[in-house]
Image (spheres, rainbow, N blue to C red):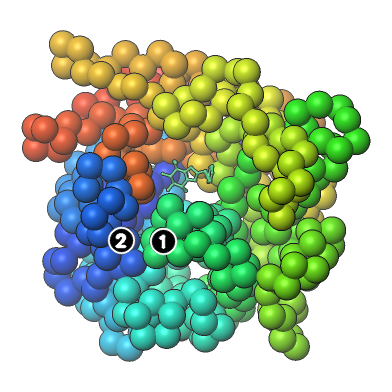
Amino acid sequence: MRAVFPEGFLWGVATASYQIEGADFEDGKGPSIWTDFSHRPGKVNSGDNGDVACDHYHRFSEDIELMKQLGVNSYRFSISWSRVLPEGRGKINRKGSDFYNKLIDRLLEVGIQPMVTLYHWDLPLELHRKIDGWESRDMRHYFGDYSSLVFSEFGDRVKHWITLNEPYCSSHVSYLWGEHAPGKRDLKTSLTVAHNLLLSHGEAVRRFREVVKDGTIGLANVSTFVEPATDSKEDRWAARIRDQFINGWFFETPITGEYPSELFKRFNDAGVQPLIEDGDMDLISTPFDFWGVNYYTRNVIRKEESSILGSEVVQGELAKTEMGWEVYPEGLEAFLYKTFKEYGKKPIYITENGMACKDKLTDGFVEDFERVDYMKRHFSSALSALKAGVDLRGFYVWSLLDNFEWSYGYSKRFGLVYVDYEKGLKRIPKRSYYYYRDFLERD
Ligand SMILES: OC[C@@H]1[C@@H](O)[C@H](O)[C@@H](O)c2nc(CNc3ccccc3)cn21
């Protein structure tokens, strides 16, 4: 089926620094908010943390060889801010930047194009402790300085960049529900954080234009397809508001320079809206080049007036992954079409798509047929979106390796490659790895 995708389409795999690198205290790296959070009792399943993770920091050559054998032509990864700037600002840590230089050079040697995420949740702990991290408006300056530094260091070889991975998670999962670092639980704070993240996104895009003249930069968002539980007016309205909260807040605002109006009014009436200063919305809507769509599932929504969103998520009836997320590839096509039609007709990369399975080693192998089926159905959905006119440029499977799944620790496996945490982090390609390899090989 690969041959029906456009020439130059990027087929890749995606990872993130804190989830795979390990070496969390090595070679001058500074702690991140996840270093702190994962070491707090009760925050992460089984007390797991990213101190070692998949030890990618030391084993990156082996992992690149796995990508080469897989046949991908691109690899999406994130830079650990506190590995290159241990305190988030000030002097560069050359051992940290050397790691990424070696990683990028090796990828290019084997014909794999890097796509680099500037921020995938691992904020330098010093910035959190000294200036309250993302709660501070000053973060746009520090994120801008960090961005300029890495653009200067790597922009000669890295031509595809993502400012933020899922500001929805860095704000609401982290500051409203408290499930991610730093584990706060306040809506007004989470909306302020979301605003500062979007300001920082805009600042990074402006810095990018100054440094990298021949590259492209985008924003990767949570992309959950939202549907009403019934066709009632109430549920349809509830789904509209919930869609603005999950998707529109981060897809519409950087395009229009305005927050989604119905939801903003709700927040304003409740006195929890973010403080917007002159110039903020211009900065947030600095033009960028592409959307990153992280699609996994849908949310079925019904009216529930007790919540400020006026809705609740209901359990759908479809088969679910180990994360409890419904398998709904139709939602991917619909979401891609909506994003392309309503949010600026920009090129789109599917920057994450994958599933957690109950992967078990049997005679030294993992027959993850469910993941193969999930991939087939989502590749097909992506092709349908392309045929419907969506300017889809690439597809990154989440993830190359089983890795640190945030508050779930190592209990959830998303990898095409099994990581044997009991036996020296041995990498064992699963059935899905070979399916993807054959898919990429075949015309
Ligand atoms: O959970 C799998 C991955 C995770 O490992 C990545 O670091 C992260 O970018 C990621 N985002 C989603 C989808 N986001 C989401 C957020 C809240 C509720 C449901 C899904 C899944 N994943």
* In the foreground, 397 or 140: 140
Q: Residue at x 26, y 29 (%)?
A: 418
Taking 45 as reference, is 422 above or below it?
Answer: above
Q: Amino acid at mark 1?
A: Gly
Label 2 with label 1: CB-CB less than 8 Å: yes
Which badge, 2 or 1, is on the more N-terminal residue?
Answer: 2
**x then y, percent, for residue 53:** 22, 48
Q: Amino acid at mark 2?
A: Phe
Q: Residue at x 44, y 16 (%)?
A: 370
Rendered image: mark on residue 111:
none
How far apart are the alpha carbons under marks 2 and 1?
8 Å
**x then y, percent, for residue 164:** 52, 62
Crowd tier of the residue under label 1, counting other residues whose Cα lies within 10 Å: few below 14, some 14–19, many 20 or above: some
Taking 32 as reference, is 341 above or below it?
Answer: above
Q: Going by the picture, which residue comes out furthest to the top? A: 363
Q: Going by the picture, which residue comes out furthest to the right? A: 233
Q: Residue 175: in sight, yes or no?
A: yes
Q: Secondary structure at mark 2?
A: helix
Q: Secondary structure at mark 1?
A: loop
**x then y, percent, for residue 13:** 42, 40
Rendered image: mark on residue 37:
2
Q: Residue 21: in sight, yes or no?
A: no
In the image, taking residue 52 as reference, residue 20 lies left or right, namely right
Residue position for label 1:
183
In the image, taking residue 124 as reference, residue 278 lies left or right, namely right
> In terms of image quadrants, where is residue 204?
bottom right
> In terms of image quadrants, where is residue 39?
bottom left
Taking 290 as reference, is 82 above or below it?
Answer: below
* In the foreground, 117 or 280: 280
